[in-house]
Image (tube, grey):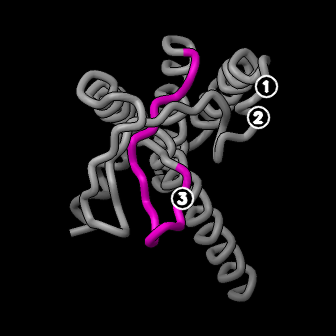
Amino acid sequence: MLSKLVPKLQHPKMPLWVVIGTLIADQATKLHFNFWYAIGETTPIIPGLFALTHRRNTGAAFSFLADTSWAIPFFIVVTIVAVIGLTWYLKKTTVEQIWLRLGLALILGGAFGNLIDRIWHGEVIDFILVHWQEHYWPAFNVADSAICVGVALMLIDLYIEERDKKRKESAK
């Protein structure tokens, strides 16, 4: 099955479609929660483990710097710089670097999604709430998930690259 998927993942436009798909999924889900949920409203899905909620975050991950007046402009500038750097890096990749390209595309889609929120709302809309009984993980969204999965894929690519490099060195 993976062998049938690889040619599609090696398509030159694959990263663009992943960025667009991630951005659409992120903004559509945020729009849903912004429209249908009051801020703070929560719907338990799996009691004691998983809920959907409408939260706002003016900071970064785990509300980092949320209480500062300069957080939003700072994160907008940092995100724009990161997007430029990631786009440049993505353009340097080859179609054979599937996991790296996919990871970069997911990170870019997530970065764009949260950037739109910061510009449009002055904060990021979060809605996924994972917890164990009364121990809560900070709420997050599709963009945050895409960024995390993208970083994991980049680490997988790094592992594969290092493994292949060691195999070639040992074969000499």
For residue 69, side relative to residue 105 (left or right)? right
The label on residue 68 is 1
Secondary element under disc 3, as helix, strand or loop, is loop
Q: Percent x, y for residue 74?
A: 76, 21
The residue positioned 37% from the left and 33% from the top of the image is: 26
Q: Percent x, y for residue 108?
A: 53, 34
The residue positioned 49% from the left and 47% from the top of the image is: 139
Q: Residue furthest top?
A: 120
Of marks 2 and 3, which one's residue comes earlier in the chain?
A: 2
Q: Label 1 neighbourhood size at 10 Å, few (<14), some (14-19), many (20+)?
A: few
Query: Which residues fall within the magenta stretch?
Result: 122-138
167 vs 109: above or below: below
The residue tagged 3 is 137
As shown in the figure, which amino acid type bears the numbered disc 3? Trp
117 vs 168: above or below: above
Secondary element under disc 2, as helix, strand or loop, is loop
The residue positioned 47% from the left and 28% from the top of the image is: 113
As shown in the figure, which amino acid type bears the numbered disc 1? Thr
Q: Quadrant of the N terminus?
A: bottom left
Secondary element under disc 1, as helix, strand or loop, is loop
CA gap, disc 1 to disc 3?
Answer: 22 Å
The label on residue 142 is none
Residue 17 colored in magenta in the image? no
Q: Percent x, y for residue 131?
A: 45, 64
Of marks 1 and 3, which one's residue comes earlier in the chain?
A: 1
Q: Nearer the viewer, residue 40 or 141?
A: 40
The residue tagged 2 is 65
Does the image show residue 13? no
CA gap, disc 2 to disc 1?
Answer: 6 Å
The residue positioned 75% from the left and 81% from the top of the image is: 169
